[in-house]
Image: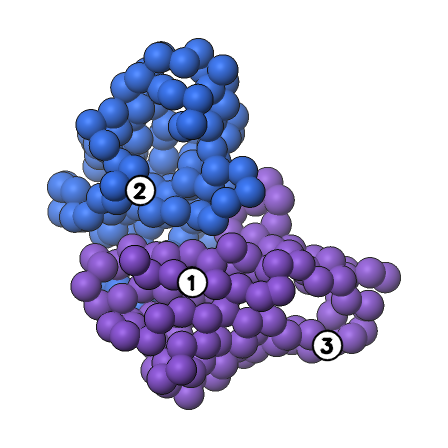
Chain colours: A blue, B purple
Amino acid sequence: EPEVTQTPSHQVTQMGQEVILRCVPISNHLYFYWYRQILGQKVEFLVSFYNNEISEKSEIFDDQFSVERPDGSNFTLKIRSTKLEDSAMYFCASIEQGPGTEAFFGQGTRLTVV
Amino acid sequence: ILNVEQSPQSLHVQEGDSTNFTCSFPSSNFYALHWYRWETAKSPEALFVMTLNGDEKKKGRISATLNTKEGYSYLYIKGSQPEDSATYLCASSIKAAGNKLTFGGGTRVLVKP
């Protein structure tokens, strides 16, 4: 069964360092997302990506964040200068079609900023 | 701001018992309601996507209903088994939101043998 895969499963980084979280969405899917869950809080939306551009982003997704789909298969989230408050579980998701269809999630990358 | 709430936060169920829990969401501009089952260290697994008022969906012993007019959905587990232990997340999307999902806080279910 096709699945969304994320690497690494856990990343520890020093405050101020850049991190890149990687995702391989399901191949025929068209919409891609990043969500995150800070420990003890709700899963929250970061950004959506469609047709090779950002379609929507949340207030959290400031200039320190960027997304890219460099080669038609990978979908990356970059945090340029990590802060302690960026520590969270980051989830990638993809949807085959438009709204109202099932979103498939990866297993997440736990980012710990020290 | 779209606010999705789930209750209870957690519940313990005896094996074989049935249970249900709630997701509430704003009914204005509603588009779809998603239910996910999430086990620790695994991907959230989609259970249902519902869009129409009165929708009822079923997958094995798990079923869900949707009331878009009053803004709530119930998830039911019939004859709970230990493997049903997980966190159940609901998420809502609205027409103007560009497909993004807004999640509730989840209901953590523990089924005791």
Circle 2 marks a residue in which chain? A
Secondary element under disc 3, as helix, strand or loop, is loop
Tell me what residue is drawn at x 47 percent, y 53 percent. A1
Q: What is the x, y in percent for residue B14?
A: 82, 68
Mark 2 vs mark 1: same chain? no
Label 1 belongs to which residue?
Answer: B4
Residue type, numbered disc 1: Val
Q: What is the x, y in percent for residue A25?
A: 34, 43
Secondary element under disc 1, as helix, strand or loop, is loop
Circle 1 marks a residue in which chain? B
Query: Which sits in the foreground, A9 or A71?
Result: A9
Label 2 belongs to which residue?
Answer: A46
Which mark sits nearer the N-terminus, 3 or 1? 1
Residue A61, image quadrant: top left
Distance CA(mark 2)–CA(mark 1): 17 Å
Query: Which sits in the foreground, B47 or B54?
Result: B54
Label 3 belongs to which residue?
Answer: B18
Position of B113 compared to B2: left or right?
right
Residue B102, image quadrant: bottom left
Secondary element under disc 2, as helix, strand or loop, is strand
